[in-house]
């Protein structure tokens, strides 16, 4: 991670920003980097390319709720590093993270853009969603941003919200879909499949005993999806091509009496090239059923067979996002 001298409390990932080139800056929290966010960021990238400038994202960490409502903070779809990686993949030259501290939160709406310009003197244009709010008490809106920018010689571009099924896409809407297990909706709004990534760890080998060996991940996202069984696909260094699978995310009540942390167990529907220590990526495609406790392992084995059949049916009929 680079930290150019002109940044102060700002930290940048990606290219250093030469001060001579005009900067086109996308503003927002961008949790999830969904289709609505991409409309803002794509506009900044295209504007920068037309003018020979640089495109960057200015985002914040942690979420403001961690400061104002620590006991009821917003659970996030992405951690800071994953979000930065997703943003850089959209073609921006840098991701700049402003620490969301008490001092930053006290900057008035009228002083917000001057603060940004002070740290980024090459600022030429800012891009934001039409519902972007900023400054102390979230008192600033796009109309105020336009007025402030005019005084500083900075252009403002606002992107209309992107709708899905007649309603605006938002990070909070995607969070609700994930916690409800509505993975098809979440993926549609994200514009890509929701992903879990981790290292395969050894388990109790019960799946192998049942005839359904699993790849186990100890995976602890900030925002946990609904516990249950999903149709998924798996990739990794040993198989860049996606492999179809069925996954259970939960506490395994049939075989665990006091599990305290969910486990992500994935059974491939064909040959499995992965093993202990491999890093794999699991793409969540479709919710099949909630997790439940069975009377015995025989009932569990029967249900897993049905789960595999349901997943295979989904793969035969569904259009899957790439």
Image (cartoon, rainbow, N blue to C red):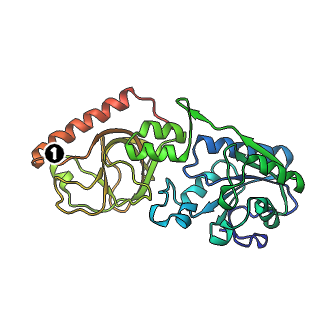
Tell which of 29 and 249 is nearer to you: 29
Residue 302 relative to residue 138: left or right: left
Image quadrant occupied by the N terminus: bottom right
Q: Within the image, what quadrant is residue 232 found in?
A: top left
Which residue is pictured at 35% across the width and 59% down the height? 200
Tell which of 203 and 44 is nearer to you: 44
Q: Within the image, what quadrant is residue 230 found in?
A: top left
Marker count (numbered):
1
Estimate the x, y position of residue 76 in percent, counting from the top left: 50, 56
Q: Residue tagged by mark 1?
A: 300
Residue 69 relative to residue 39: left or right: left
Estimate the x, y position of residue 270 in percent, counting from the top left: 30, 41
Q: Is residue 39 visible?
A: yes
Estimate the x, y position of residue 39 in percent, counting from the top left: 67, 41
Q: Is residue 54 above or below residue 299?
A: below
Q: Is residue 262 above or below residue 163?
A: below
Estimate the x, y position of residue 119 in percent, counting from the top left: 79, 67
Residue lying farthest to the top in this orientation: 317
Secondary structure at badge 1 equals: helix
Which residue is pictured at 74% across the width and 42% down the height? 158
Q: Within the image, what quadrant is residue 222 found in?
A: bottom left
Tell which of 118 and 193 is nearer to you: 118
Q: Is residue 281 above or below residue 102?
A: above
Q: Is residue 25 above or below residue 185?
A: below
Q: Is residue 153 visible?
A: no
Mark 1: few/some/many CA within 10 Å (<14, 14-19, 20+):
some
Which residue is pictured at 78% across the width and 65% down the height? 115
Tell which of 50 and 154 is nearer to you: 154
């Amino acid at each position: 991670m680079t930290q150019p001298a002109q940044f102060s409390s700002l930290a940048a990932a990606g290219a250093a920003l030469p001060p001579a080139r005009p900067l086109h800056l996308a503003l927002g929290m961008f949790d999830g980097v969904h289709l609505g966010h991409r409309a803002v960021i794509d506009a900044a990238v295209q504007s920068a390319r037309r003018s020979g400038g640089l495109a960057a994202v200015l985002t914040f960490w942690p979420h403001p709720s961690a400061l104002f409502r620590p006991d009821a903070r917003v659970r996030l779809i992405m951690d800071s590093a994953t979000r930065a990686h997703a943003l850089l993949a959209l073609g921006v030259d840098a991701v700049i993270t402003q620490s969301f501290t008490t001092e930053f939160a006290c900057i008035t709406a009228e002083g917000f853009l001057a603060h940004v310009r002070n740290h980024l003197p090459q600022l030429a244009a800012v891009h934001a969603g039409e519902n972007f709010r900023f400054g102390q008490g979230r008192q600033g809106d796009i109309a105020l941003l336009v007025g402030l920018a005019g005084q500083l010689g900075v252009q403002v571009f606002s992107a209309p919200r992107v709708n899905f099924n007649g309603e605006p896409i938002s990070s909070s809407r995607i969070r609700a879909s994930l916690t409800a297990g509505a993975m098809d909706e979440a993926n549609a709004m994200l514009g890509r499949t929701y992903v879990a990534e981790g290292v395969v760890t050894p388990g109790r080998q019960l799946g192998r005993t049942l005839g359904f060996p699993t790849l186990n991940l100890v995976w602890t996202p900030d925002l946990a999806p609904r516990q249950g069984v999903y149709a998924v696909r798996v990739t990794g260094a040993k198989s860049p091509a996606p492999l179809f699978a069925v996954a259970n995310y939960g506490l395994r009540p049939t075989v665990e009496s006091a599990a305290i942390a969910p486990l992500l167990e994935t059974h491939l529907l064909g040959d499995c090239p992965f093993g202990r220590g491999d890093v794999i990526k699991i793409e969540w495609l479709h919710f099949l059923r909630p997790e439940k406790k069975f009377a015995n392992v025989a009932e569990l084995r029967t249900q897993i067979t049905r789960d595999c059949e349901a997943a295979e049916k989904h793969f035969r009929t569904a259009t899957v996002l790439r």
